[in-house]
Image (cartoon, grey):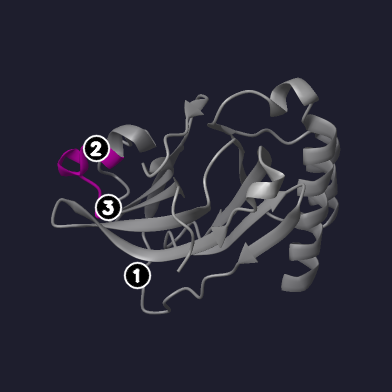
Amino acid sequence: MKKLLLSLLSILMLISLFSGCTPQQEKVGNYLEKAELTEEEINILKLAEAQEPLLFDFTVNTGKSFTIQTFELQDGQWVASQGYSSSINQDNLPIDGRIAIRQDEKTGALLLIAVQSKTGFTHSAPMPDESVPEYSAHSTTSLSSRTEIQINKPIAFHVYYGYSDSQTSHTAYFPDYALEHPEEIDSDYAQIVAITFSDKPLS
């Protein structure tokens, strides 16, 4: 089933890339923004009874590698947990790509990271820690507008907030604010997903 979902996700991302990017868009500077599925793509997912992934589009004109990193909130500070890195083929710059993630709604565990560009498809499937607690309520926020990519600076694009008490009211900050102000987060658990494009090659 996992292979089927991965194949389906690959097809969806390819369709989106080749039908959604115009030559003019490819020449625009470095940016990351939330992507939207077409009606056709949504219908394909429904047919396969698959969970709709969170999708983000990016364009980069420079860089040698990128890292998608998750951070967990501990004692008012973000602490790096899982990471996924890949090299950028500089002969193929600029790169238009798409990132897809899926997350366990009860624990916040990242179940899938997939990255698609016109030059290839890569994916990572982190193994969730079975000892992670489940939360009775949760909320998420994602990147809401086009954001400029700055080399060597992380861009937070998704945050998960877990709550032990579903009756308590909490504030779910957007990713950029949450990254800069972890001390203001009042959830029982928080996980942020960020991407960093680097001018350094992978060692």
- Front-most of residues 189 and 16: 16
The mark that comes first in sequence, 2 or 3, is 3
Residue at 64% in and 63% down: 123
Residue extending farthest to the front is 91
Does 183 appear in magenta? yes
Determine whether, in the image, residue 21 is placed left or right of residue 29.
right
Q: Amino acid at mark 1?
A: Pro
- Residue 131, x across and y down, in percent: 36, 79
**Other residues around mark 2 within 10 Å, as few (<14) / some (14–19) / many (≥20):** few
Q: Residue at x 66, y 41 (%)?
A: 93
Residue that numbered label 3 is attached to: 165
Name the residue that disc number 1 marks: 133
Q: Marks 2 and 3, how far apart in space?
A: 25 Å
Q: Amino acid at mark 2?
A: Glu
**Residue 93 appears in the rendering:** yes
Q: Which residues are magenta?
A: 179-188
Q: At x 51% / y 75%, what residue is drawn? A: 127
Tell me if label 2 and label 3 are in contact, CB under 8 Å. no
- Residue 48, numbered label: none
Give above or below for 115 relative to 1.
above
